[in-house]
Structure formats: C-alpha cells, structure tokens
C-alpha cells in the first residue's frame, strides 16, 4: 500500500509557531471514528512544545490539547538486560498513547493497536507489563490486541467501546469522556525517577492506591441507596489513610465501578447539581 500524505498547516497552541505537517491519507479514509487525535511530538511543529491535535476526517483542525509533560532525555541508568522501560513505551506510543493504554487497562476498555512499525515482538511484552501494573484480581483483563497493518477504512471492531490507536502517534477512537489527568500525573511522577526500573513500580503503586479507593466506594455503594459525590469524597478521605480524593477522582471511581462491576452501582453516585437541574 503506497503511503500518500495530506499536508496540513498546524499552529502550536502555546507559542503560535506554525508548520505544515504530513498526515497519512489513510487516516482520513476511515469515516467511522469521526474526529481523530494526532500526537504532535516536540519538534513536530515547534522545537519546544508537544500537543494533541483534534482533526476531523476532512482534515480540518477541530481543537488542541496541551501536554505539559516533557520527556527529558535523562542519561540512561543501569538497565536490567531485556528490561522494557516506561521511556521505551513513550518512544513507541507517545505520551498520550501511553496515557490511553494505561487508562484502557485500568478501566477495562478493550484496546486495539494497528501495527505500522515492527511492533510484533513487543505485543506480548506490552500485555505482560500492562498486567503487571494491575493488582491480582484485575490482571489478564482488558487485553491490548495488535492488529496487522491494514487499510484503515476497513477496520471493524468487535466492541464499540474500544480504544483504537496505531503505533504512529495517532489515536483513532477513545471510548471515554474523562480527561486523562490521572494517567498524566502518575506517568509524570514516574518519569521524574531516574532509575528506569523503579518507574513502572511507581505507576503500579499509584494504580493500586486508586483501586483500593474504588473498591472501598464499591463496598459502600452496596450498602446505600444513593450517595452524593461530595459526601463520597469526604468519606473516602476520612476512612482511607493517605487518600486525597477530589471530585475528579470520584468521577474516575464511578467509571471504574461502571466498567468493572455494575452500571447500576455506579449510578448510585449522584451529583447534587445535576439532580437539581433535572428537577427544574
Ligand atoms: Zn510551541
């Protein structure tokens, strides 16, 4: 399949420098997924910033999202032989791609990655690492499936609520509405550690802490009819040591319970403002 490109003028949302970038034509040949997110790496448009570009299937730019995080080229520490690090992950999938994969893994969304490069031999490894990030009972759920390089317009996914991306920094479909602040935060904290081997461990700890909060909320919801999100924030922070839960975190907990346990249980978490709006 010959690669044709479409040139699009992109302006950096931070410093307003602009540059034409080449986007593979086949990204636009798919019409099923609507808006696409393209990760523009540092140096892609301007030397300093990286961001996400929202683009529709006609190639019209619909919006931007900044990524504040930067991958500093720290000197590589001593690496265990064959060790695959967070840094390697980011180099293949981009920061935002890594956030998406971690999110899919935690929240049990099926994930598909279209292979353009030679990612074959790492597909098993990626799943192994993904499972290692999750605590016991959650391992081996939400598999990341690698698809052979294919015509993008012919992709049919079994599940509608799946993540679909490629290994060329393009995100074709995300099934969630939440922002990936949690993932950005834990990846940022991990990348600040110089020891490559400790980085994935830190992410694992942060995910375990989140899941403990979600499980606590789940047990609580089984005993009550409804609970307001603000009350849930207060309760978790009071009952679970070292928890600093806020409303954003509660929206994640709600999604976790919906995706992994029961939508009915998740719906018991009510938003006072929404309830009021429903009444009028
Ligand atoms: Zn810039």
Image (cartoon, grey):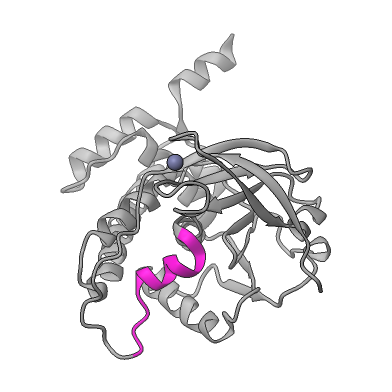
Task: Say if residue 222 shows up in the picture.
Answer: no
Q: Nearer the viewer, residue 105 or 262?
A: 105
Residue at point 47%, 82% (across, down): 125
Residue at point 58%, 68% (across, down): 167
Q: How many marks?
A: 0
Determine the residue located farthest toward the bottom in the rendered image: 81
Which quadrant of the view contains residue 19? top right
Q: Nearer the viewer, residue 103 or 138?
A: 103
- Magenta residue span: 82-94
Residue at point 25%, 66% (across, down): 74
Task: Say if residue 127 shows up in the picture.
Answer: yes
| In this picture, residue 211 sits left or right of residue 120 | left
Q: Is residue 202 above or below residue 173?
A: below
| In this picture, residue 267 sits left or right of residue 188 | right
Quadrant hosting ligand 1: top left
Q: Is residue 109 magenta?
A: no
x and y, in percent, of residue 262 in the image: 54, 51
Residue at point 46%, 54% (across, down): 43
x and y, in percent, of residue 141 in the image: 51, 70
Main secondary structure type of the part rendered in magenta: helix
Quarter holding the N terminus is bottom right
Determine the residue located farthest toward the top in the rendered image: 280
x and y, in percent, of residue 280 in the image: 59, 8
Q: Nearer the viewer, residue 214 or 156?
A: 156
x and y, in percent, of residue 9 in the image: 65, 42
Which quadrant of the view contains residue 208? bottom left
Q: Is residue 91 magenta?
A: yes
């Amino acid at each position: 399949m010959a690669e044709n490109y479409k040139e699009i003028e992109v302006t950096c949302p931070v410093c307003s420098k602009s540059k034409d970038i080449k986007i593979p034509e086949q990204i636009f040949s798919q019409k099923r997924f609507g808006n696409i997110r393209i990760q523009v790496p540092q140096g892609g448009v301007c030397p300093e910033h990286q961001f996400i570009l929202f683009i529709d299937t006609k190639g019209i730019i619909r919006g931007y999202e900044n990524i504040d995080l930067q991958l500093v080229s720290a000197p590589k520490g001593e690496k265990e032989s064959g060790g695959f690090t967070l840094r390697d992950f980011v180099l293949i999938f981009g920061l935002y791609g890594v956030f998406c994969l971690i999110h899919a893994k935690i929240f049990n969304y099926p994930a598909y990655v279209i292979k353009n490069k030679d990612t074959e031999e790492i597909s098993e490894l990626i799943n192994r690492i993904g499972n290692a990030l999750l605590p016991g009972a959650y391992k081996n759920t939400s598999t990341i499936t690698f698809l052979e390089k294919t015509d993008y317009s012919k992709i049919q996914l079994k599940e509608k609520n799946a993540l679909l991306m490629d290994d060329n920094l393009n995100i074709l479909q995300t099934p969630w509405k939440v922002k990936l602040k949690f993932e950005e935060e834990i990846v940022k904290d991990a990348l600040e550690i110089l020891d490559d081997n400790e980085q994935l461990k830190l992410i694992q700890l942060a995910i375990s802490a989140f899941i403990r909060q979600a499980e606590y909320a789940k047990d609580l919801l089984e005993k009550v009819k409804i609970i307001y999100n603000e009350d849930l924030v207060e309760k978790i922070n009071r009952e679970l040591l070292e928890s600093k839960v806020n409303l954003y975190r509660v929206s994640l907990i709600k999604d976790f319970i919906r995706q992994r346990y029961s939508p009915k249980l998740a719906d018991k978490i009510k938003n006072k403002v929404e309830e009021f709006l429903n009444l009028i």
